[in-house]
Image (cartoon, grey):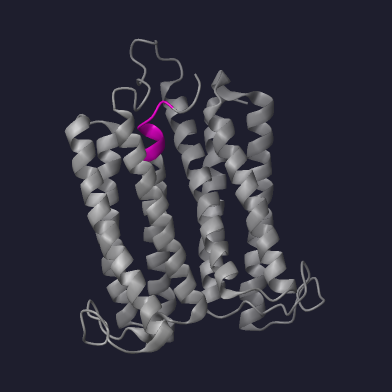
């Protein structure tokens, strides 16, 4: 296998995992979780289920997940057997992809067969996001390796992160962990149906801090407050990286992209609130919200890894 073919395999796997991520959100947003009853891997006891919107959405998600699982397996075997560029970095990425793909499939099956709490169901999206991020990082490595193949050592891209202090790595890591917490809270809101508890945006029910409304309002408001804090933390991270990295470095580019994505995510949250009364529009604004947060999480993970000499040569 050549590096170019390997790059295309990782790209196809990354695109496939993105489709799986979106399909999972569609299942939740269209309330199709029970579209196949309590049967798995069959759908209502059939290999090809009778047509209903819920059953087709749920079963399509299963079929796509299965096909992408094969791609992940192929990428894993190619990496293990071929050992591209004799580096451990792609092995870390593809191993993460395989692990999180298997884990999300297992959790999905358990959610169908056995009743799960809302807190456990919210984990499913986070795990899918980890699987997508691993495939995205894997493709990024393959693309860089393919572009540098054949170049002399003097003109190859230097190892990212060697000139940055370890404090940048830790700051980035804390930001990633906090971002995941915000993501989990958003997934929990979706599964508990608390999205409409805070009417209006950016205020919650016309108040800066809502004084009444019960648990649903508290959850929705906590997510908004956490998103605002994420904006502040990411802005501080950008400022911190800017003081310690060149303006044209990979780290600085990732940091700038992260702050743009945080702003877009907050605005898409406002759009989500404004369309919550229109189910047809809400499905698409929910997808937009998911796409942006997945991109943000992936960029933050990339920044974290590229600010420390984490992998062996």
Q: Position of residue 289 (x, y in %)?
A: 38, 66
* Quadrant in which residue 189 is drawn: bottom left
Nearest the viewer among 68 and 184 is 184
- Magenta residue check for 196: no
Expressed as whole percent of the image width and height from the top left, the position of residue 17 reads: 55, 53
Q: Does 125 sit left or right of 285 as displayed?
A: right
User: Does any portion of residue 200 appear in the rendered image?
Assistant: yes
- The quarter of the rendered structure image containing the N terminus is top right
Q: Position of residue 70 (x, y in %)?
A: 69, 48
| Residue 123 to residue 270: above or below | above
Residue 202 image position (x, y, % from top left):
22, 76
> Relative to residue 199, is residue 283 drawn left or right?
right
Which residue: 67% across, 59% down?
105
- Give the residue displayed 59% in from the left and 68% down from the top: 120
Q: Is residue 158 left or right of residue 64?
A: left
- What residue appears at the point 31 percent right and 64 percent down from the top-left corner? 227
Tell me if residue 117 comes above or below residue 6 in the rendering.
below
| Badge count | 0
Q: Does residue 281 appear in the picture of this structure?
A: no
Question: Relative to 287, does residue 54 appear above or below in the rendering?
Answer: below
Image quadrant where residue 92 sits: top right
Q: Which residues are magenta?
A: 303-309
């Amino acid at each position: 296998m050549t590096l170019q073919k390997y790059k295309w395999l990782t790209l196809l796997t990354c695109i496939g995992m993105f489709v799986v991520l979106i399909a999972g959100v569609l299942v939740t947003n269209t309330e199709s979780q029970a579209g196949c009853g309590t049967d798995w891997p069959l759908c209502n006891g059939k290999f090809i289920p009778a047509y209903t919107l819920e059953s087709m959405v749920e079963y399509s998600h299963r079929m796509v997940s299965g096909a992408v699982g094969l791609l992940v397996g192929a990428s894993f075997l190619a990496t293990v057997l071929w050992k591209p560029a004799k580096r451990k970095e792609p092995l870390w990425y593809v191993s993460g992809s395989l692990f999180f793909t298997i884990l999300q499939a297992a959790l999905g099956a358990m959610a169908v067969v056995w009743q799960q709490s809302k807190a456990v169901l919210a984990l499913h999206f986070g795990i899918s996001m980890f699987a997508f991020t691993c495939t995205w990082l894997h493709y990024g490595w393959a693309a860089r390796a393919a572009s540098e193949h054949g170049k002399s050592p003097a003109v190859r891209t230097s190892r990212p992160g060697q000139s940055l202090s370890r404090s940048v790595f830790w700051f980035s890591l804390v930001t990633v962990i906090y971002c995941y917490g915000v993501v989990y809270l958003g997934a929990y809101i979706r599964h508990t149906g608390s999205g409409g508890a805070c009417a209006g945006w950016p205020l919650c029910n016309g108040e800066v801090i809502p004084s009444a409304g019960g648990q649903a309002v508290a959850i929705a408001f906590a997510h908004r407050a956490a998103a605002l804090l994420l904006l502040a933390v990411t802005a501080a991270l950008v400022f911190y990286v800017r003081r310690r990295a060149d303006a044209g470095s990979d780290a600085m580019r990732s940091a700038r992209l992260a702050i743009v994505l945080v702003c877009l995510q907050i605005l898409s949250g406002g759009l989500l609130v404004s369309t919550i009364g229109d189910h047809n529009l809400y499905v698409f604004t929910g997808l937009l919200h998911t796409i942006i947060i997945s991109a943000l999480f992936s960029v933050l993970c990339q920044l974290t890894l590229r600010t420390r000499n984490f992998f062996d040569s």
